[in-house]
Amino acid sequence: MTKFYEEENANVHRGIYTLSEKATMAYEAARETVAQFIGAAAEEIIFTKGTTESINLLAQSLGKTLQPGDEVVLSEMEHHANLVPWQELAKEKKAVLKFIPLTSDFQLDMEKAQQLITRTTKIVSVVHMSNVLGTINPVTELAALAHQVGAVCIVDAAQSVPHMPINVRKLGCDFLAFSGHKMLGPMGIGVLYGTKKLLETLSPFQYGGGMIQEVTYEKSTWNEVPWKFEAGTPHVAGAIGLAAAIDYLQGIGMDQIQEHDQELTTYALEHLSQLPGITIIGPRTNRGAVISFTLSGIHPHDLSEVLDRERIAIRAGHHCAMPLHTKLGLVGTNRVSLYLYNTIEDIDRLIAGIRNAQRIFR
Ligand code: PLP
């Protein structure tokens, strides 16, 4: 990103001068990197601000095709980013939202999913890995259920793309969204993947420069995909930074990252569950490296505050999944999220920190 700003800083797709051509090449090379990372073609990669904007893009563009009474199927464990845009769309279009419930082991109830996804369903949009429970959802199965009834399947992959190898063709989804800042990349850049066939049928999300083919005072026609969806000056340095993060992650290997995650998660679950008064909010198996829990007698904010004094950063609250917490009868939880830079020693320090907090609040 520094190199870009120092040596190639110009707007893309406009200038005929060398600097702009260099910037365009770097930006489009970043798109290629993202595409190969998830097994897509470059024209299927739209750069956005992040997962939230990617889903809003779909709610607006795909949303235009909905008729009153059409159904959008989500799950009970969605992040607000994959809930609120659909609520707004449902209000506007008189569509109906349905939610796949959870089993007692915090997995999606796939029998219920089968019953909920019907000919009236037009969109199935689910989180791949829950940012609260850590549950990894069977998105391939959900995509198949959606396709059986002619619906499209959207995957919120904000938590999964950073932590495991992802191939969109294998997943079989139509759209997939993720964010750069959760995978060692910069903030303010993210991705929407969509199959070329579907992207070509969708209306643009925003209008202005860069996304047009021909403009008269009366009307305009649209650029090809993916540029049709990238109105205005894009976050060029962000895209370049995201590609650098992907190169770095791939240098380590996504399989290795997933293995490391699993090792840390198993260790953390084993040791956390031995703490008195702890309840782990999430499944034992089929899960990733975010672990939410409550401790009896200690408010999540208090625990987080005490741990922060020991320079241990964990989240406290509803983690942008308020309905899920309400459903589980919780005001909030603490959440540990582990990644490739964490070690077993970090977890030992965390456990010692929690024991210390338990002594303070006894
Ligand atoms: N979806 C999930 C599962 C998330 O964990 C997050 C971020 O916390 C988002 C969506 C929203 O991502 P962003 O804020 O980068 O748009």
Image (cartoon, rainbow, N blue to C red):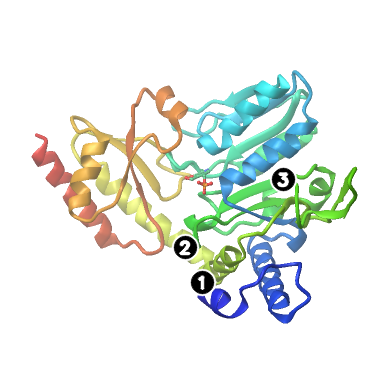
Look at label 3 and name its amino acid: Gln
- Disc 3 marks which residue? 206
In the rendered image, residue 13, in percent from the top left (x then y), is placed at: 75, 67
Question: Circle 1: is it few (<14), some (14-19), or many (20+) Cα within 10 Å?
Answer: some
In the rendered image, residue 111, in percent from the top left (x then y), is placed at: 61, 26
Q: CA distance from mark 1 to mark 3?
A: 32 Å
Look at label 2 and name its amino acid: Leu
Tag 1 near tag 2, CB within 8 Å: yes
- Disc 1 marks which residue? 248
- Disc 2 marks which residue? 184
Closer to the camera: disc 1 or disc 2? 2
Seen from the viewer's position, the closer of residues 265 and 359 is 359
- Compare marks 1 and 2 and give the one earlier in the sequence: 2
Look at label 1 and name its amino acid: Tyr
Q: Going 76% across and 23% down the picture, which residue do you hit? A: 120
In the rendered image, residue 22, in percent from the top left (x then y), is placed at: 69, 78
What SS does tag 3 mark?
loop
What SS does tag 2 mark?
loop
Q: Quadrant of residue 236?
A: bottom right
Closer to the camera: disc 2 or disc 3? 3
Determine whether 125 is above or below 35 in the image. Answer: above
Is 181 positioned to the left or the right of 233 in the image?
Answer: left
Q: CA distance from mark 2 to mark 3?
A: 28 Å
